[in-house]
Image (spheres, helix red, strand yellow):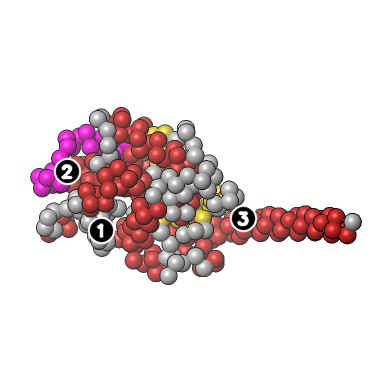
Amino acid sequence: MYCYLHYIGLLAYNCQTTRIYYEMVMNMACRTKKELKELVKEARKCIAHGKVADYIPALGKANPKDLAIAIQYPDGKCISAGDIERKITLQSISKVISLALVLMDRGTDEVFGKVGMEPTGDPFNSIAKLETMTPAKPLNPMINAGALVVTQMIRGDHVEERTHRLLSFIRELTNNSFIGINEEAARSEFETSQLNRALCYFLKHHKIIEEDVETLMDLYTRQCAIEMNCLELARMGMIFAMNGLDPDSGKQIIPENIARICKTFMVTCGMYNASGEFAIKIGIPAKSGVSGGIMGAVPQKFGIGIFGPALDQKGNSIAGMKLLELLSETYQLSMF
């Protein structure tokens, strides 16, 4: 009888403890959401100093005052603030995803035989370093020249098949089968990507790129025009934060070593030629795009999705960068 009553007592205690813990977690989430809104409010002050990427006409239509953030935890909890349902095109954030896919397909030896692993202090669309490199391969996969080389290696017989493979991979990472392409943005970028064509022809001359340039540009601009909201962006970041593991399904979507390589590039090259300053001030793996998106991956903790289309002079979301800096300072997120 004593054992039975003792068991009932422990059960009641555990239920009470579980309830208290649950309420504590929920209260923390609510308080964090409130704090997140305050950080967004503070970061908005930077927006006036930025400018949308109007050199791509479709991106120039964005509202520079928009700012949103979502934080996705591996236990399924998500907190957010701002215009989180606003869809954005991935632009250069897609470079991380295509790199992961191509590394899974072809392995490190083949991929890094054509593109290097070193950061650069030059702008993301610069051709200067290519002219001084021997062989003339791009320094890393996060600059445009390197990303074009990586995109060339996506397997498939035609653009549609290769696009579908990348989309299927992204749909798995986001757990959303409706992720698609903004056709207006893809067309707009295809029609205005003369500098990227120049990079392709230079690399084709040196036999780093081997396929038809217009075919590659079609694929690359469609890759950049894949769109989603901050919630989905944060979920992708969370998969990288968890070393490629999807906590919901238990599936290892990205091999751990490939996730590690991608996160390393995000730290060293992910914020264009502001990556060194970003590492010192913020210190988390992250990748930006000229649509104003930022995907962050705080190792073993959570993923971050940000949208703020007003950009600084280096092509990063000006309010998004400030928001990450405030987050890192407030919650001590730096991995260094």
Which region of the structure is painted magenta?
201-222
Whether residue 57 is visible to the viewer of this picture, yes or no, is no
Q: Amino acid at mark 2?
A: Ile
Q: Nearer the viewer, residue 231 or 265?
A: 265
Residue at 82% x, 56% y is 7
Residue 300: give x, y in percent of width and height.
49, 58
Q: Amino acid at mark 3?
A: Lys
**Residue 25 covered by magenta stretch:** no
Whether residue 36 is visible to the viewer of this picture, yes or no, is yes
Q: Secondary structure at mark 3?
A: helix
Residue at 48% x, 51% y is 238
- Dividing the picture into quadrants, the one containing residue 187 is top left
Q: Which residue is mark 3?
A: 33
Q: Which residue is mark 1?
A: 117
Q: State the CA–CA distance, disc 3 to disc 2.
A: 47 Å
Q: Is residue 215 left or right of residue 3?
A: left
